Image (cartoon, rainbow, N blue to C red):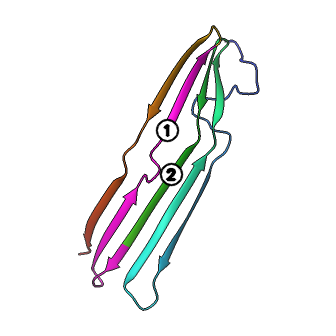
Amino acid sequence: VQNLPGPDNRLDGQQPWSITGGFDYRLTGLPVSMGANLSFTPGYLTTQTLTQSMEQTRSRGFDMFAQWTLSRTSSIRMSANNLWPVDTRSTTFVTNGYSRTERYGRTQFGLSWEQKL
């Protein structure tokens, strides 16, 4: 087994850092709560072999929800997920080769009803 030289000799998909934050808020006097979640991962380079590296561009995520409580046992929830739907990967070969893949996720909307028994 041969060791790869640094500094980008990390595992594939192992970003150097990431950050996630979110909040939930219940409206005063109304049976409504809402929230959001935001995540971010920076772009980074990974050395895969002595002649190949992969560049991952930044990744972002943003989700939101609102929930209406109808009774102690029933509620309705609306959600929107993946509101920033872009992800790009590039693979560079030291021997002047290049490959690029772009993935466009879809924003998903949801409506659900919860009934506790």
Q: Badge 1 is on which residue?
A: 87
**Image position, residue 90 (x, y; %):** 55, 26
Label 2: few (<14), some or many (≥20) within 10 Å? some
> What's under tag 2, amino acid-wise?
Gly
Which region is colored magenta? 67-93
Residue at horizontal 49 percent and vertical 77 percent from the top:
25
4 is higher (above) or lower (below) than 10: above
Q: CA distance from mark 2 to mark 1?
A: 10 Å
> What's under tag 1, amino acid-wise?
Asp
**Image position, residue 61 (x, y; %):** 50, 51
Q: Secondary structure at mark 1?
A: strand
The N terminus sits in image quarter: top right
**Image position, residue 44 (x, y; %):** 65, 34
Residue at horizontal 25 percent and vertical 69 percent from the top:
113
Q: Badge 2 is on which residue?
A: 61
Q: Is residue 28 magenta?
A: no
Q: Main secondary structure of the magenta part?
A: strand
53 is higher (above) or lower (below) than 103: above
Sequence-wise, which precedes: disc 2 or disc 1? 2
The answer to whether residue 12 is left or right of residue 79 is right
Determine the residue located farthest toward the top in the rendered image: 95
Residue at horizontal 67 percent and vertical 45 percent from the top:
17
The C terminus sits in image quarter: bottom left
**Image position, residue 53 (x, y; %):** 63, 20
Based on the displayed image, in which of its 4 quarters is residue 34 positioned?
bottom left
Nearest to the observer: residue 42 or residue 48: 42
